[in-house]
Amino acid sequence: MRSTGFRTLLRREILRYVRRPRNTFLPPVITNLLYFTVFGVVLGARIDLGDVGLQQTGLSPSEAYILFILPGLVVLGMISNAFENASFSIFHGRWNEYIHEVLTSPLSHTEMVLAYVTASALRGVVVGLIIWAIGWLFAPVPLVNPFYLLAFTVVIPVLFAGFGLIGGLWAEDFDYLTVMNQFIIRPLVFFGAVFYPLEALDGIALTVSYFNPMVYMVNGVRYGVVPGAVDVAPDVSLAVLTGLTVAVVAIDVALVRRGYGLVE
Amino acid sequence: MTAPAIDVRELRKSYGDVQALDGLSLTVESGEFFGLLGPNGAGKTTFINSLVGLVHADGGTAEVFGFDVEADYREARDRIGLAPQEYNVDRFFPIHEVLEHKAGYHGVPHDVAEERAADALKTVGIWDKRDTRFDWLSGGMKRRFVLARALVSDPDLLILDEPTAGVDVELRRDLWELITDLNDDGTTILLTTHYIEEAERLCDRVAIMNEGNKVEVATPQDLMERGTDTVEVGLESAQTTAPTLDVDGVHGVTVEGDTLLVTAAGGSTLAPAVMRDLESQGYTVTSLDVRRASLEEVFVDLTRAERTQSVETEVAQ
């Protein structure tokens, strides 16, 4: 009986964004068409990536660059949408107090968290698939390591949906959400070896990059589609991300149980 | 023996320096129609929110049908339907879906939830607005809707926080009829209201709250009997000064022309003694009427007395 409550909240959360595709799915379509056109088709042929494992694919230079940036753009899309969905849904519910409909119901704290996180992660995955599909229009995308591709594209959105939930509980105004997405997440992704290989960096820039968690996510997804070398061993990245995801979801449950941001 | 619908002991909650609940203890029996009266800031909404999980009490215990609202929160919340004072409705979905979701959160399967939502909307008379979003409903319809949402989970305890605030007379009477029927069918009702007439008319018992605590709990009838009645005594001729009455229970006597206004607790009981005393003093009584204290007057008396006592205590300290 109890799982009916979880399924209902999950369904409600999914319907909220599925019914508003112009706000949820159209923007990443437009943005990524622009990315692939400008960075791939226009600039890609002029960029020398060095030895990143794309030489033996037989792709043209612009297709090779599109294939190189595709994983990073997928990660950016997944992260942004999973985070934004969870943080917005929680914060908007708090702001207008309709989250009380959930809080006064007999859902367990774990069910509440899992429903919000699953729905938000699913939005991230759907946006990731959309970006893959757009990339496919510009260059053939091989499946080199499907296991890693699948694993990373599941773990990353779940992790950021979990972070988004914390953000939604913490925020006291809509400005907080903008700050988190625009000034923290987006810069980390852009400096996370999306548009350039780590080898292009040296000295302090390279060292700092190794402290950027996005580097490991982008590399993990890239390992799924780009044959040959990657910057960081994907097994370690996957293990660390999985552990981090479990920890973040556990923190989500603890915060909701405590009523942080929800209960007076 | 059935557990009380609500049983709170020494419930405390403060917001900074403000003590919203100050050791409140209260029991509402299963099946009762219970009213909660009190001025703004008395702690009524904080008390309600502590039952449904929107307020975490600093101390004390609260149980709903024997389930602790913290330890057994799922069981407790499953039995409560809440129509809050402030609107807190999901604006993303048409109202019939909002109800389906609420029922679903309570474990009602989707097909049954659809039927429940339809029934609830028909019960409150806004079925034809089922595809409308909450924001587009009129004020009265919004009130009806929050009641429908409280009903859709088929609660054993219906909590109505000022359900008739700002609604027209017709809707108020509709809501009264509806919640009276629900109570007749066995649903326990906890009603907070500023309309004393509403409590007087509907409730089996009322609690008067002030400054986070209970001042009094009794039936509306008992409370009114404890209030100060006014005995209007008509005299043969106009008087310039009020006579002194030697009758226990008389609070005061004032003169209005040829009428004496005698204020007393239990005016009906004292009226014959008042008349005898006046006649023994040489007055000729031509008429006698007892005006009973209204619940509103009792409420004002009790909350005023409580406030005065608090001030005196503070001064003494």
Image (cartoon, helix red, strand yellow):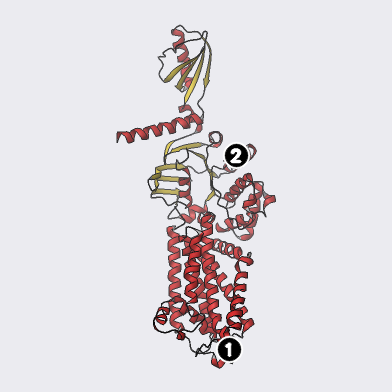
Question: Contact (CB < 8 A) between labels 2 and 1?
Answer: no
Q: Counting other residues with Cα less than 10 Å from the Cα at mark 1, is it few (<14), some (14-19), or many (20 or more)?
A: many
**Where does residue A251 sit, x and y in percent of width and height?**
43, 66
Q: Which amino acid does label 1 sit on?
A: Pro
Left or right relative to B316: residue A172? right
- The residue drawn where x is 52% and y is 20% is B290
**Where does residue A21 sit, x and y in percent of width and height?**
63, 67
Visible residue check, residue A202: yes
Report the mark closest to the observer, 2 or 1.
Answer: 1
Q: Which amino acid does label 2 sit on?
A: Trp
The chain under label 1 reads A
The answer to whether B264 is drawn above or below residue A147 in the figure is above
The answer to whether B65 is drawn above or below residue B114 in the figure is above
Which residue is denoted by mark 2 in the rendering? B176
Which residue is denoted by mark 1 in the rendering? A61
Depth order, front residue of A61/B197:
A61
Depth order, front residue of A215/B282:
A215
**Where does residue A40 sit, x and y in percent of width and height?**
59, 82
Left or right relative to B33: residue A259? left
Visible residue check, residue B65: no
